[in-house]
Amino acid sequence: MKTLSLFALLLCIAPRPASAQDEDSLRVGVKGFVDTYHALRTESPNDWMSSRTRVRGEVTLEKGHGGAFVSANLVYNAILKDRSGFQLREAYAYYSDSHWDLRAGRQIITWGVADGLRLTDIISSMDYTEFLAQDYDDIRIPVGGLRLRYSREKWGFEAFAIPVSSFFELPTDDANPWSVGPLPIGDKPSHRLCNMEYGGRLSFFLSGIDFSLSALHTWNKQPVFCDGVGQYRRMTMLGADCSVPLGQFVVRGEVAEYLDEAQAFGRASSTNALLGLDWYAGNDWSLSAQYAHKYVSIGKHRNSGLATFRISKDLLHNTLALQSFAYIDVTNGSIYNRLSADYALNDQLHAILGYDFFNADRGTFAIYDNNSEAFVKLKYSF
């Protein structure tokens, strides 16, 4: 109760802009939103797939080059009762100047140039409690660790260490419409110093191209079922990504080599590569396509492919945003497509209508083949 009262008090603090004279005084910034989301299955038994309401608060305290950031949710979930309550999202202290940026605490770390696909972006885990029927940023799970960044005009370096790893959250409760059923998952790695994650990324920002090189010593964050038991194993990732603007187009590429990755038959290295193309066609049209391929060095099924396609259009003086974003399991011929219409009633209030469509006989989306749903969402930002 004390935690909730403190959080409510922070939300009521009005942000005060800093002037040049009080640059070294304490500055407080508060923002956030209130949203409510409800989804109804469009196939039998036509039940509620989701019903949740949330208050998000983000508080920033700054003094000089130092500060702290806290992001948290107050949630009421009518279907998943155990998801109701106070949820701490990010909470870290930081120091930042023109070149250095140091963050310590609970934070979200993102890498790579892929959109909605994970190749080098495997530091923060994913919350699959409602699969992908959430905003992608909400699916990311923060990690507790230390991150140091050094930046110059044309290059930058980032290093981090995570003493306690986080792993995928999977829906196993039968009361959850997105449940994958009970899973025999083994023990997660113990909280020992030798089990920590660490890595680094070197980025370059040159004329006509941005690219990065990365290395990461981590774990498979989603359990791999070997001998009937979900297991977590050490692995090393070596990766690279690039982004090249070409007029109305942006070409994106990403590659990641997973060394000694856990597989259903044991352990093997895998090569993961992605090619993406974005087209900003004018008149508020944009299109994006990606293809990611995975090759496993040994085993029966060595090749698999996953593609995405996004098309969006803004209308009514940019107050109405129409979008279709699809995941296509190329290997198994299945699809998940989210259609949405986002109407801005004003700068703070948005109303969103949408439809999630599943069509899959096998592969990643097969278990959700009966989960097509219509949804409505209201969001007020402050």
Image: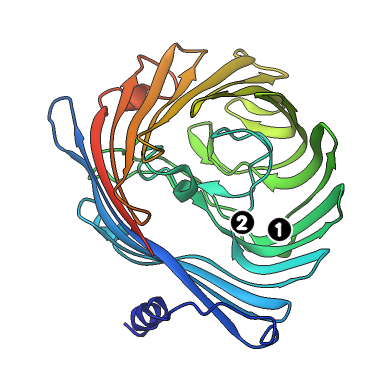
Q: Nearer the viewer, residue 377 or 161?
A: 377
Give x and y (percent) for residue 133.
Answer: 36, 38
Which residue matches tag 2?
165
Question: Where does the N terminus fall, quadrant-wise?
Answer: bottom left
Instruction: Note whether 278 is above or below 28 in the view shown.
Output: above
Residue 70, position as x, y percentages in the image = 52, 71
Residue 39 appears left or right of 301 = left
Q: CA distance from mark 2 to mark 1?
A: 7 Å
Q: Quadrant of residue 69?
A: bottom right
Asked whether the beta carbons under mark 2 and mark 1 sit within 8 Å of each other, the answer is yes
Q: How many marks?
A: 2
Which amino acid, by three-letter code, is at mark 1? Met
Which disc number belongs to residue 196?
Answer: 1
The residue drawn where x is 48% and y is 77% is 15
Q: Residues within 10 Å of mark 2 (few under 14, many from 20)?
A: many
Question: Would residue 279 be visible to someone looking at this image?
Answer: yes
Tell me the kind of residue under disc 2: Ser
Residue at 54%, 25% in the rendered image: 282
Residue 196 vs 64, above or below: the answer is above
